Image: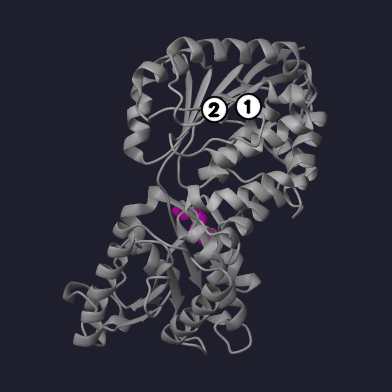
Amino acid sequence: MSLPDLPHLFIADLGSGLTLGPETLRDACFALRQNREHWLAGQRTRPLLEIVAYTAEQWLDPNNEYRIRALRDGPAETGFPAATLARGLDAFFGSLTFENLEALVVQDLGDSRRLDEFSSTVPEARGARTALARGPILLAHIAAGNLPNPTLFSMVLGILLKSAQLVKCPLQGGLLPSLFAHSLAHTEPKLGSCLELARWPGGDERLEAILFHEADCVTATGNDETLAHIRRRVPLRTRFVSYGHRLSFAYVSNELLSTYSVKRVVRNAGADITAWNQLGCLSPHVFYIQEDGAISPEGFAELLAAELEAREATEPRGDLSPDESAAISTRRAIYEMRAAAGVGVRERFRAESPFLEAPGRVRLWKSENSTAWTVVLETDLLFQASCLNRFIYVKPVRKLTDALRYLEPHRHQVSTFGLGAVDFRAVELSRELARWGVPRICPLGKMQEPPAPWRHDGRPSLGDLVTWTDFET
């Protein structure tokens, strides 16, 4: 989508009809490196943190022109309704405070001055060592087309690392990264000269060979097949950092299933399911509900259905493609038949849990006359991925270990576990999840709202992108 009401600062502003040639792309890479050398490379970290934090704060203002345009034009490009888009952008930009960004630098690099000068942590100083961290000179991002936040955050990381950046947007996407880049350029024009955004069809090896050759580091977000294809083509001397397909889940312990606290738990669960229409890697596929609470798993599922119905009135999911709607309708029909027949558990799993010794149960709640939301309660613990777009499974378990046993084949794909538990139980359960391999555990209601210093997929966001120089004094 072209942006006729914005100045043409970036290649992507010229519209998807532009045919980008190899020489133009090579020239853009050269100009980015030159502009970085003339200004960005000499900046200290603190002013860059202030630029990002100030720009993010402006995005939270309802009257901000870039926010207004994002909410006006974003739904047509992204498919997210304005209310869903606004909530997601508020959570993202609200996390980009100066304090959070500084915490990210200190957490990953040990000292807020690491990118400016040689500095030491206390253990390093005792060992007569000091170190300087360097970001890539040219950082290239291959952006995915579903959620904007990963691309926006990658751009923020590049700024903190003082890297020139080229963002390759999907051919029919890139509105929000373009608006964010424009807003940064509005705050500091010289920073805008160190950014470039372009569009071309994915897999164009002629253009991407140039980009991968010119870049010092390439980041990519997408499905595993796409990432494997990119990895094979990135030169060995170029660092490649990828973010692939991940799955997320939630668990609620029975202490919170009381008439006093369950409403808050259900409200937070609804927030996690509706955020970004459940399309992100941080969105839950299944809520595992511990048995023997005052509210049964079936009661929880019924309350959750009512919560999703209420949210549809204030934050509607929006329209889907025919294929997406058909996938939900087909999945619903399967569970409706199973519920009517009283069949819900595969015979070979009946003996593995006392709860499953009873006849298997399936219940389904759904929005009427639409596919807006669906809640399926089933006692079969075998994992099946949700078809998303507010389609959620609720599964009863006796304890967390039962859920993890059935998730074992997907252990290395897990991103986030939303946890509903009282304090003393939360510590115990988090220890169990961490030992099993979960990289992120968070309270319910925050699954799609990671803090800026979070370690993406269990890895240091800045640490994976820098190169170090050690100075032994």
Residue drawn at (69%, 15%), measured in percent from left and top? 36
Instruction: Locate residue 278, reporting x and y percent.
Output: 47, 60
Instruction: Locate residue 71, reporting x and y percent.
Output: 61, 53
Q: Main secondary structure of the magenta part?
A: helix
Q: Is residue 229 magenta?
A: no
Looking at the image, is 212 positioned above or below residue 226? above
The residues bearing labels 2 and 1 have C-alpha atoms spaced at a distance of: 7 Å
Looking at the image, is 86 positioned above or below residue 144? below
Q: Is residue 220 left or right of residue 119?
A: left
- Between 5 and 415, the one lying in front of the other is 5
Tags 2 and 1 in contact by the CB under 8 Å rule?
yes
Span of residues in magenta: 431-436
Residue type (three-letter) at the residue carrying disc 2:
Leu
Residue drawn at (57%, 87%), measured in percent from left and top? 258
Residue 460, visible in the rendered structure = no
Q: Is residue 106 left or right of residue 439?
A: right
- Between 241 and 427, the one lying in front of the other is 241
- Between 441 and 62, the one lying in front of the other is 62
User: On the image, numbered disc 2 is attached to which residue?
Assistant: 14
Mark 1: which secondary structure? loop
Outermost residue toward the front in this view: 4
Which image quadrant is residue 327 in? bottom left
Q: Which of the marked residues, 2 or 1, is nearer the chain's N terminus? A: 1
User: On the image, numbered disc 1 is attached to which residue?
Assistant: 8
Mark 2: which secondary structure? helix
Residue drawn at (55%, 76%), measured in percent from left and top? 313
Q: Is residue 101 left or right of residue 215?
A: right
Residue type (three-letter) at the residue carrying disc 1:
His
Looking at the image, is 157 positioned above or below residue 340? above
- Between 435 and 231, the one lying in front of the other is 231
Instruction: Locate residue 159, reporting x and y percent.
Output: 68, 29
